[in-house]
Image (cartoon, grey):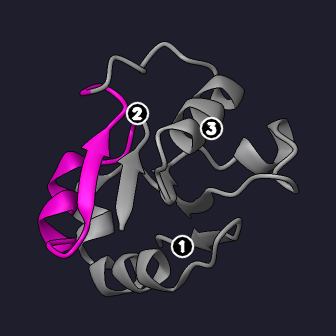
């Protein structure tokens, strides 16, 4: 599966997704794109999942016609995310095309 990490998504998370092709927005020089532009570019590049820490994304964008699935991690703190790695990986593996999943990080 082609997975795109948005700005703020901790890059070490990619080490826990060995069966996926993970790329960051930074690596593609997409860091300065707005959320809508990023989603459009990601879909055009055939990414299947966007992993982001932007909890406002669903309020800022109309996601109903999007093909790309979105997984929102509710923290940018790598130490806190590390404690929830199985939940994050399950969310990425289980999200459906066009789906939206939030992973709570206490």
Label 3 element class: helix
Q: Circle 1 sits on which residue? A: 103
Q: Which residues are magenta?
A: 8-27
Q: Is residue 13 left or right of residue 42?
A: left
Indicate the quadrant where residue 86 lies: bottom left
Distance Cα–Cα, label 2 vs label 3:
13 Å
In the rendered view, tell whether residue 35 sits above or below residue 81.
above
Q: Please report whichever mark, 2 or 1, sits nearer to the chain's N-terminal start.
A: 2
Q: Position of residue 43 (x, y in %)?
A: 58, 43
Q: Position of residue 15 (x, y in %)?
A: 11, 64
Quadrant into which the N terminus falls: bottom left
Q: Circle 3 sits on which residue? A: 39
**78 or 86, nearer to the observer:** 86
Q: Residue at x 56, y 37 (%)?
A: 44
Judge whether residue 57 is colored magenta.
no
Label 2 element class: loop
In the rendered view, tell whether residue 3 sits above or below residue 5.
below
Q: Circle 2 sits on which residue? A: 7
Q: Position of residue 105 (x, y in %)?
A: 47, 70
Q: Residue at x 21, y 71 (%)?
A: 17
Label 1 element class: strand
**69 or 52, nearer to the observer:** 69
Label 3 crowd (10 A; few <14 / some 14-19 / many >=20): many
Label 1 crowd (10 A; few <14 / some 14-19 / many >=20): many
């Amino acid at each position: 599966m082609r997975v795109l990490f948005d700005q703020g998504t901790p890059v070490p998370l990619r080490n826990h997704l060995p069966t996926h092709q993970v790329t960051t927005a930074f690596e593609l020089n997409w860091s300065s794109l707005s959320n809508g532009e990023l989603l459009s570019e990601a879909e055009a590049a055939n990414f299947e999942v966007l992993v982001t820490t932007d909890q406002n994304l669903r309020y800022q964008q109309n996601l109903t016609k999007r093909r790309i699935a979105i997984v929102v991690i509710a923290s940018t703190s790598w130490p806190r995310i590390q404690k929830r790695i199985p939940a994050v990986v399950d969310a990425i593996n289980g999200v459906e095309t066009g789906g939206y999943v939030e992973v709570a990080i206490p």
